[in-house]
Each structure stands twice: as C-alpha cells, then as structure tokens.
Amino acid sequence: MKHKTSKIVITSVLLSLSHYAVAEECFGIALAGENDCATSLNSCAGHSLEDAQADAYIDLPKGLCDKLVGGSLIPKD
C-alpha cells in the first residue's frame, strides 16, 4: 500500500508541474486510467488498462521523463 501511495503522490506532483513548463510525452509511467491520450488499446485519455502501460503517456516538464525509472520519450512495444 505504501508503494502505491508513493506512486500516486509522485504522479500527482508531476502532473501539477507539467502545466508550468514546456511539456513532453513520457511513456511507461502513467497509472491505470491516468494517461493523457489514446493508446493502441483504447481511443481516449484516462482509459489505460494498467499501471506503467508501455504505450500510455502523461505530459511532463521537458527533461524530466528521462530521469524517471521506466520513463521513455518513445512508446515501448
């Protein structure tokens, strides 16, 4: 439970920061249902099926994605 809560807090902070800087799409770190746009498995934001889905992204401030474990600027297979 502690690990999941930490992920939620980190994601919330990162999402709030994304509105203040130039953003980039960061794949592989969004929580289930928290993605910012469509994926190969769905056609709408907020409909990713699992945490860290490889083709689901969230917008983050430029330069932050590469610093996150599992973060990628390109969708994974």
Image (tube, rainbow, N blue to C red):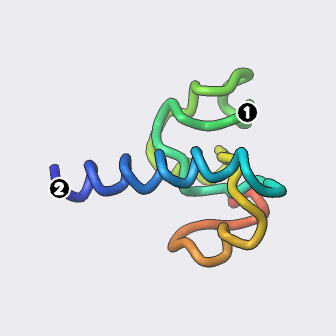
Mark 2 or mark 1, which has the lower sequence index? 2
| The quadrant where residue 62 appears | bottom right
* The residue positioned farthest toward the top in the image shown: 44
Q: Amino acid at mark 1?
A: Cys
Q: Nearer the viewer, residue 34 or 51?
A: 34
On screen, residue 61 above or below 4: below
Q: Amino acid at mark 2?
A: Lys
| The quadrant where residue 47 appears | top right
Q: Which residue is mark 2?
A: 2
Residue 13 locus on image (x, y percent): 49, 51
Residue 4 locus on image (x, y percent): 27, 50
Select label 2 or label 1 by which is in front. 2
| The quadrant where residue 29 appears | bottom right
- Neighbour tally class for label 2: few under 14, some 14-19, many 20 plus, Cα within 10 Å: few
Q: Is residue 10 left or right of residue 43?
A: left
Q: What is the spatial separation of the Cα atoms under label 2 and label 1, in whole angstroms?
A: 28 Å
Residue 64 locus on image (x, y percent): 66, 70
Q: Residue at x 66, y 67 (%)?
A: 65
Q: Residue at x 69, y 67 (%)?
A: 72
